[in-house]
Image (tube, rainbow, N blue to C red):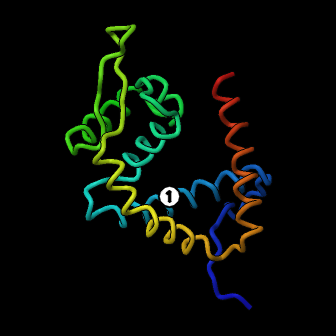
Amino acid sequence: MSTRTLVPVALPSESPTAAVQTFRLVIALAQELRTLMDQRLLPSGLTTQQVALLTVIEIKGGSPTFTETARALAMSHQNVKQLAVALERKGFLEIVPDEHDGRSKRMQVTKKHRKFWAKRNPQDHACVGEWLAGLNEAETATLARLLAKALESARAAREA
């Protein structure tokens, strides 16, 4: 019999739907993973949110605008700007004017960023694997597929 403590997903007086239970578990898992990554990143002076911003810039390719990045991260333009300014100060990205719209700013990663992550990613990826070691490879793949589907649904709801 397992001695692990289950995450409470319901008050004693309620019987939440599977969707509500899932929502609560995803929030709890996200907070745990963010805390673990923040602890891992602490010596580098970076935060999980800053790394998320850098990741979105890389995934989008080129140099996305603050607005595009804010939409992708589901955060405010102001929050993205604060993260970007801190990352620019640390040398991980550059904020550049848009060639076609002088009011708009774009972000692009630097050589320092690429060099830093090329060295660090293998160990970080191994740690993420350890954090999810309670799942086998097939379960992890299924979870990733289901979370991607749920994310798509949540984004559609936000856009509606």
Q: Residue furthest bottom?
A: 1
Percent across and percent down for residue 79 are 36, 33
Residue at left 70%, top 37%? 152
The front one of 62 and 151 is: 62
Q: Secondary structure at mark 1?
A: helix
- Density class for disc 1 (Cα within 10 Å; few <14, some 14-19, many ≥20) is few
Q: Residue at x 50, y 65 (%)?
A: 125
Depicted 34 relative to depicted 129: above or below: above
- What residue do we see at 62% from left, 69% from top? 7
Is residue 138 shown left or right of residue 124? Answer: right
Asked whether 90 or 15 is in front, the reply is 90
> Does 156 sit left or right of 110 as displayed?
right
Count of numbered labels shown in the rendering = 1
| Quarter assignment of residue 1 | bottom right
**Left or right of residue 16, residue 51 in this image:** left
Name above or below for residue 116 compared with residue 129: above
Q: Vertical placement of 102 versus 119: above or below? A: above
Residue drawn where x is 49% and y is 71% of the image = 127
Disc 1 marks a residue whose amino acid type is Gln
Q: Picture coordinates of residue 77 (x, y %)?
A: 40, 26
The residue pinned by badge 1 equals 31
Q: Position of residue 67 (x, y in %)?
A: 45, 22
Camera-side residue of 21 and 150: 150
Res 8 → quadrant: bottom right
Q: Quadrant of the C terminus?
A: top right
From the viewer's perspective, is residue 138 above or below residue 92?
below
Q: x, y percentage for residue 11? A: 67, 61
